[in-house]
Amino acid sequence: MAGKLRTDVGIDKIKDFLMSKIDLNSPVEVEKVGRYLKHIEMYRRMDKTVQKEGVSIQVLNGGQAFVKSHPLLSEMNKVNSSIMHIERTFKFLDDDDSGKFTTDDLV
């Protein structure tokens, strides 16, 4: 089996990849890259905290103790949804596939 899947791609590599795929003259697309990278950084910080503190926490309420999921898990889901939404809105330069396929490509 191959080694562990690495998900710790550097922010600079992600930025370079995205910037190579968008129209750099479009301030909107450049802004999206910036927001995307900030969201990834936020997600990674929250993930480190959850890794350190655990996915569940103990909450004391008066004389009672409750175990509940870490509050950052919900926030991580929100940030992840934002990341996915930004990904769907990118207009990559090579997205225009019209004209690249012919009827011979149909099976």
Image: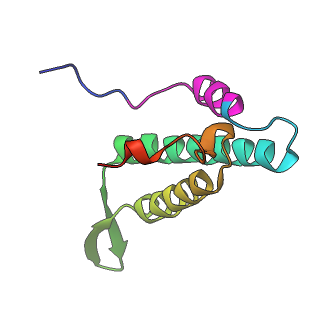
Asked if the stretch drawn in magenta spans residue 11, the answer is yes
Q: Quadrant of residue 11?
A: top right
The quadrant holding residue 5 is top left
Outermost residue toward the left in this view:
1
Q: How many marks?
A: 0
Residue 62 as seen in the image, left or right of residue 32: left
In which image quadrant can residue 30 be found?
A: top right
The residue that appears at 43% across and 48% down in the rendered structure is: 103
Can you say which quadrant of the picture contains the N terminus? Answer: top left
Residue 35: percent from the left, percent from the top? Answer: 71, 48
**Percent x, y for residue 84?**
52, 56
How far across and down, in percent of the image, does residue 69 sit?
32, 65
Reply above or below: 100 against 74: above
Q: Which stretch appears magenta?
A: 7-20
**Could you say which is closer to the camera, residue 48 or residue 23?**
23
Q: Nearer the viewer, residue 19 or 34?
A: 19
Residue nearest the observer in this picture, 82 or 25 = 25
Question: Where does residue 63 sit, x and y in percent of width and height?
Answer: 29, 79
Q: State yes or no: residue 15 in magenta.
A: yes
Q: Main secondary structure of the magenta part?
A: helix
Q: Which residue is situated farthest in the front direction here? A: 104
Left/right of residue 62 with respect to residue 64 in the rendered view: right
What residue do we see at 57% from left, 60% from top? 85
Q: How are the colours assigned in the image?
A: rainbow
Q: Is residue 86 above or below residue 44?
A: below
Residue placed most toward the observer, 89 or 75: 89
